[in-house]
Amino acid sequence: MTEQAVAAPLTPAATTTLSATPPAAAAPATSVLGVAPAAALPVTLADVEAAHRTLDGVIARTPIEQSRALGRLTGSTVSFKCENLQRAGSFKVRGAYNRMAKLSEAERARGVVAASAGNHAQGVAVAAARLGISARIYMPLGVALPKLAATRGHGAEVVLHGHNVDEALTEAKRYADETGAVFVHPFDNVDVVAGQGTIGLEILEQVPDVDTILMGVGGGGLLAGVAVAIKAKAKELGREIRIIGVQAENAAAYPPSLAADALVPLTKVSTIADGIAVGRPGQLPFSIIRELVDDVVTVSEDSLARALIFLLERAKMVVEPAGAVGVAALLDGKLTENGATPGNTVIVLSGGNIDPMLMLKVIQRGLAAAGRYLVVRMLLDDRPGSLATISRIIAESDANVTGVDHTRVGGSISMGDVAITINMETKGDEHCEQVLSNLRAEGFQPVVIQG
């Protein structure tokens, strides 16, 4: 979902630990770990610990699951923090509840309003139901039906407005100004960031010897909150814990913003990871991330699809693309590109709310990216036996045909020709090349459509 913060550029920071940011003048009073003084940050460890107490008995203490398969592939110890198993299916309920629990009686009486295409909507709806507050959620007209039904199912009033989350967000703010309802921002709020940071406290309790933590970043609330908790606790322990943010490369607003040390909005956002499809970082999270986070890396759409397939097959986890970006980064070797060793690594699986139709498309893309799904198109003479010959070649190549489209009509099809599109299950990139080579050896000219 695209939930953008409207904020002015930040003034240059005194110091930064982000590798994406050019070197800056050293700032006084920073710790040896590069952690800025607590007073300089808008959210502190005390805020996160207070949120932890507020959320006690409200949210689930999600489990840590070790991934031996991913550990073997990467040569490290890897565990998942399963926020996909959280109430409402994502971490968002943490920040939403912490924000709304602090409202006065007068504010609660006016109700809350938010805008979202998914996880934030459900988090606000669950928190509002628990606190007895009326909630109005603006969602874009094209929102996935499961997310719409889930938000209504949690008791919120849903208003469909606009063609994207930006338009829904504008309407939600107008409604707040007009009625006095409290606007609950998805990430650009101190209490929201502190609530998300409670994940960091849980990780340290569950994996005390953690070396590296990876998680997706959109507006930045989750990454900022966890960084506050982890870096402060690491300082108390006298050791270093690396915090890495991961963005989809087609929705990566943080790298250019960190390089410029100012909020740099994207002109276009396009990714299957709708949960982190944010075109502009939140000002408050950015001010924390530039000080505390060690790096922000990006992953491709194909890498995201492969990671989702890996989680389904090897971890038996249903995770949305935004929740799988950390797995994609590890599989792509993003943590070792600069010679760093991940060590004992925890990946936050931030959400599991995926539309089944999107899952179908992502699975198909993931299989193709892994060389396990091949679609080819061929022009043939329209004569008996051609299709039988192709079927024989594919069968002898040990591939499995899952679909065939046969047509004689089209702009590129000459009279007397026929176009055949064949979908096949394959066993990897080498197998795909073998199938294509066998077809060419028989005089056919397959064009790869997908694979």
Image (cartoon, rainbow, N blue to C red):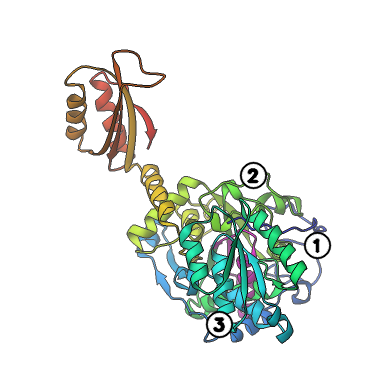
In the image, 188 versus 307, the foreground residue is 188
Q: Earlier in the sequence, mark 3 or mark 1?
A: 1
Q: Amino acid at mark 2?
A: Lys
Residue 216 position by quadrant: bottom right
Q: Which residue is mark 2?
A: 268
In the image, 368 versus 438, the foreground residue is 368
Up-down relation of residue 174 to residue 273 (above or below): below
**Circle 2: is it few (<14), some (14-19), or many (20+) Cα within 10 Å?**
few
| Pair 1/2: label in front | 2
Residue 362 x/y as whole percent: 42, 49
Disc 1 element: loop
Q: Is residue 216 magenta?
A: yes
Residue at screen point 36% across, 59% down: 312
Quadrant, the N terminus: bottom right
| Relative horizontal placement of residue 441, taking residue 310 as reference (left or right) | left
Q: Which residue is mark 3?
A: 130
Q: Which residue is mark 1?
A: 14
The magenta span reads 215-244
| Pair 2/3: label in front | 3
Q: Amino acid at mark 3?
A: Arg
Disc 3 element: helix
